[in-house]
C-alpha cells in the first residue's frame, strides 16, 4: 500500500527540516524518546502521531521566520525569559499547543530584530 498524499507531503517537509536542523536536533524537537524508547525511534514513523506533526509544523514555521538555519538553530537553543527561561527547543518538544504558539510569537518578534 502506497503513502497517501498527506504522508508524502509530511515526508517532504521532514526532509526540508532535517536539512536545516540536522538529524539530532530535529529528532529532539520532534519528541524522540518522549513516549517510547529512543532506540528504534524513526521520524518517519513518528509522523503518524498528530502531536509529532504539530511539532514539525512549528519547527518549519520557526525555520521560515529566520533567514538562516544557523540563526534559527542558535535561537531555538537559547533560554528566553518570555518562555520562563526555557529554550524554544524544549517548549517545542514538550509544550502544548498554546506554549508552541508563544514560541512562534517570540520567533516572529525576534526574527524582526536587526542582527
Image (cartoon, rainbow, N blue to C red):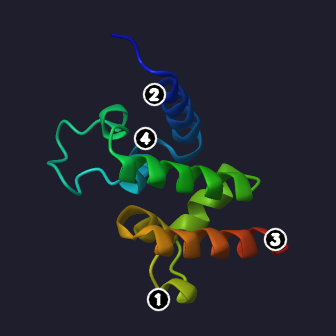
Mark 4 highlights which residue? 23
Picture residue at 46% right of the left edge, 53% below the top: 54
For the C terminus, the quadrant is bottom right
In this rendering, the answer to whether 76 lies above or below 46 is below
First in sequence: mark 3 or mark 2? 2
Q: Are marks 2 and 1 in contact (CB under 8 Å)?
A: no
Mark 1 highlights which residue? 84
Dot 2: element = helix
Q: List x then y, in percent, for residue 31.
A: 33, 54
In the depicted view, which residue is nearer to us: 38 or 36?
36
First in sequence: mark 1 or mark 3? 1
Q: What crowding class fits label 1: few (fewer than 14 Cα within 10 Å), some (14-19), or many (20 or more)?
A: few
In this rendering, the answer to whether 54 lies above or below 91 is above
Dot 3: element = loop
Q: Mark 2 to mark 4: distance in Å?
A: 19 Å
Q: List x then y, in percent, for residue 84.
A: 46, 88
Mark 2 highlights which residue? 7
Q: What crowding class fits label 2: few (fewer than 14 Cα within 10 Å), some (14-19), or many (20 or more)?
A: some
Dot 4: element = helix
Q: Are marks 1 and 3 in contact (CB under 8 Å)?
A: no
In the depicted view, which residue is nearer to us: 47 or 73?
47
**46 relative position to 61: left or right:** left
Q: What crowding class fits label 3: few (fewer than 14 Cα within 10 Å), some (14-19), or many (20 or more)?
A: few
Q: Nearer the viewer, mark 2 or mark 1?
A: 2
Amino acid at each position: 500500500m502506497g503513502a497517501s498524499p498527506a504522508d508524502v507531503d509530511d515526508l517532504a517537509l521532514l526532509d526540508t527540516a532535517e536539512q536545516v536542523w540536522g538529524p539530532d536536533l530535529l529528532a529532539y524537537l520532534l519528541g524522540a524518546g518522549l513516549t517510547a524508547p529512543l532506540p528504534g525511534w524513526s521520524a518517519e514513523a513518528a509522523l503518524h502521531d498528530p502531536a509529532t506533526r504539530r511539532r514539525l509544523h512549528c519547527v518549519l514555521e520557526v525555520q521560515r521566520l529566520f533567514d538562516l538555519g544557523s540563526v534559527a538553530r542558535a535561537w531555538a537553543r537559547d533560554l528566553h525569559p518570555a518562555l520562563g527561561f526555557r529554550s524554544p527547543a524544549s517548549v517545542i518538544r514538550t509544550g502544548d499547543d498554546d506554549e508552541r504558539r508563544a514560541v512562534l510569537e517570540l520567533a516572529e518578534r525576534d526574527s524582526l530584530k536587526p542582527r
